[in-house]
Image (cartoon, rainbow, N blue to C red):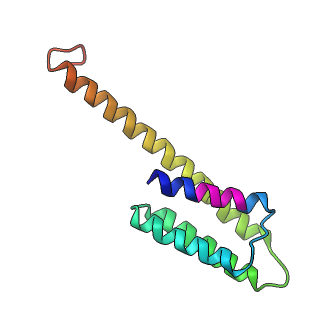
Amino acid sequence: MNHCLDTMEARLSDLLQTGLDTGGADAGAAFARLAEECEASGLHTGSTLMERLAGLLEARAHALEKEDGPLLDALFTAEHYIALCRERWQEIEILRGWQEQRKQEGEGGIFT
């Protein structure tokens, strides 16, 4: 899951750094492949967001006049989603660590 989040974040960052210069139809296909990877990792919302970006990039590659608004909205929504996933992942890891510590201390430890 972290690998998928890292890849999503890198692709979104690249897109921003290029000033939304998508690189043609290949960019849409790359985001579509990333959507499949997200789905396989259990990141269903991430998959939906990457599919949305893929569609917007595909349409943008064929448009004479580029509209940045919808692409930026989708991009920032995806960034927010990644941040929320990372927060949740940290919470899970903290809980796991706490449970492991409690388990090692046994029932007579300070947390009973």
Q: Residue furthest right?
A: 65
User: Considering depth in this image, is 50 or 6 the residue closer to the camera?
Assistant: 6
Q: Quadrant of the N terminus?
A: bottom left
The segment highlighted magenta reads 8-14
Q: Is residue 111 above or below residue 96?
A: above
Give the number of marks.
0
Q: Quadrant of the C terminus?
A: top left
Tell whether 35 sits left or right of 62.
left
Query: What is the x, y in percent for residue 82?
Result: 55, 52
Whether residue 56 is visible to the viewer of this picture, yes or no, is no
Q: Main secondary structure of the magenta part?
A: helix
Query: What is the x, y in percent for residue 90?
Result: 45, 38
Look at the image and say whether residue 64 sits in the magenta stretch. no
Residue that appears at 60% across and 52% down = 80
Query: What is the x, y in percent for residue 64?
Result: 84, 85
Q: Is residue 58 above or below residue 13?
A: below
Query: What is the x, y in percent for residue 109?
Result: 20, 15
Q: Quadrant of residue 59?
A: bottom right
Q: Is residue 93 above or below residue 98?
A: below
Q: Quadrant of residue 18?
A: bottom right
Residue that appears at 34% across and 34% down = 95
Residue that appears at 57% across and 59% down = 8
Whether residue 6 is visible to the viewer of this picture, yes or no, is yes
Q: Residue furthest left?
A: 107
